[in-house]
Amino acid sequence: MTSRTTNRDAFASTLGAFAATLGSAVGLGNIWKFPYLTGSNGGAAFVLAYLLAVALVGLPVMVVEHAIGRRMRLDAVRAYEKVIPGQRRWAIIGWAGMASALLIMAFYTDVAGWVFAYVFKSIAAAATGAPLTPETFGALAGGTWEPLGWQVAVLVLTCGIIAAGVSKGIEKVTKTLMPLLLVLLVICDVRALTLPGAARGVAYLFQPDLGKITGTVLLSALGLAFFKLSLGMGTMTTYGSYLPAETRIVPNAARVALADTLVSLLAGLAIFPTVFALGGTPAGGPGLLFNTIPLVFAKMPFGGLFTALFFVLAAIATIGAMVSLIEVPVAFLVEKGHVRRPAAAVITGAIMLALGVLATLSQGSVLSGVKLFGKSFFDLFDFLSSNVLLPVGGLAIAVVGGWLLSKDDFLAEVGRAPKAWYGPVVRHVVRYLAPVAILLILLSGLGVIRLG
Ligand code: PHE
């Protein structure tokens, strides 16, 4: 069977496809979650595990998702339903992906709301001279109406963009402003790295103490790799369905993974040297970004304005990622449910808001006492999505792409030797290395087996 051709929207060019895919990958995962998890999991050992997870598991899974997406040119549910003839059961990957998208958006919109709020708080702080402190963050995240108001604003904005259409909506928003975020991160890095005592922060990021690698650390690193690269839930399959026929999937995916990882490392290099130089704690939890960035800029001329600009750009990167998260259920509702795009965006947004309220109010407000499996709603949604659903989804995707899709069909999308020497190599990684690694890490991270 050859690729289906339909008149769905598509990315206009390979560069456009790269930028849009990167727009999905880069988001709160880089600037908020990567530093926060690195700090809570002991530093460089976690970073090392994360880099390996990206290269050996994330990249191959992204390749499979793009390949299946482009081959089928359908939303994620129908793509997996039809990709292996006679085996409709794999539609479950798309369904589970929809659940993941809803769970992720529940806490993602809460954090995105903090970012939006910090745009205004940093402008106010610059105007009044009253600095942003950990108390500022605590009051915001632990509040009730303030974080809820921001969360609603974030959802309304993102759903509005989604309602406007694929290539127009996604490509434009993400492509133009990403380089600016990069420039600002580099400015942060230079400032952070020239603070006295910064070297300890660099060592914290890059000198691994291998004794710190445990099953839990590995699972967090793997979960982050999936979350970071928007994998295991159909997002990248949907994006694959918009890929131009001439885009070479492996080099494109490799560039996306590389660029995305670079952004995370740049964020880490801004945060940890500052934390060590100015006496914070690396295990600062979800507030780490919000409590550290104002400190970096406080040591600079026009620091207040830079802080505001940082959060503006962070907000823009976040929108790109959220658009891609909402796109999973929306594409499904539009194509399978025959719902109009704006209506689909509203339905999806409403469900996300319902779950999102639970996450937001569990951060110190009325639901903070409610624990399920020992976790708040916020932590539970995060754990269930990143550390369970995405890896399980990734495992299923690797099995479908590596074992059930014929070699010929796989190589038709991914590329054949000798021109694309890597095609068969990637296929082996997809068949053996990636699924075995995911399975072992899942079992050890969830405490079923002990590694080492
Ligand atoms: N990759 C995004 C980030 O790191 C989050 C995301 C996950 C987006 C899954 C889409 C799908 O911020």
Image (cartoon, grey):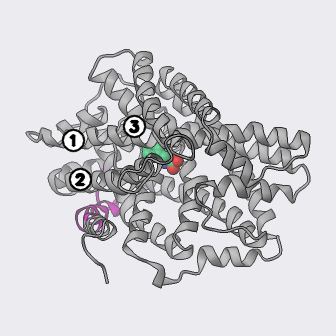
Residue at 91 percent of width and 53 percent of height: 301
Would residue 312 be visible to someone looking at this image?
no
Would residue 276 be visible to someone looking at this image?
yes
- Badge 2 residue CB within 8 Å of ligand 1: no
The verdict on residue 449 being magenta is no
Is the Cβ of the residue at disc 1 closer than 8 Å to that at disc 2?
yes
- Badge 3 residue CB within 8 Å of ligand 1: no
The magenta segment is 414-435
Where is residue 68, by image quadrant? top left
Residue type at numbered disc 1: Ile
Mark 1 / mark 3, whichever is N-terminal: 1
Disc 3 secondary structure class? helix
Residue 92's label in the rendered image is 1
Name the spot of residue 64 as percent of width and height, x first: 31, 51
351 sits to left or right of 160: left
Name the spot of residue 117 as percent of width and height, x first: 69, 38
**102 is higher (above) or lower (below) than 163:** below
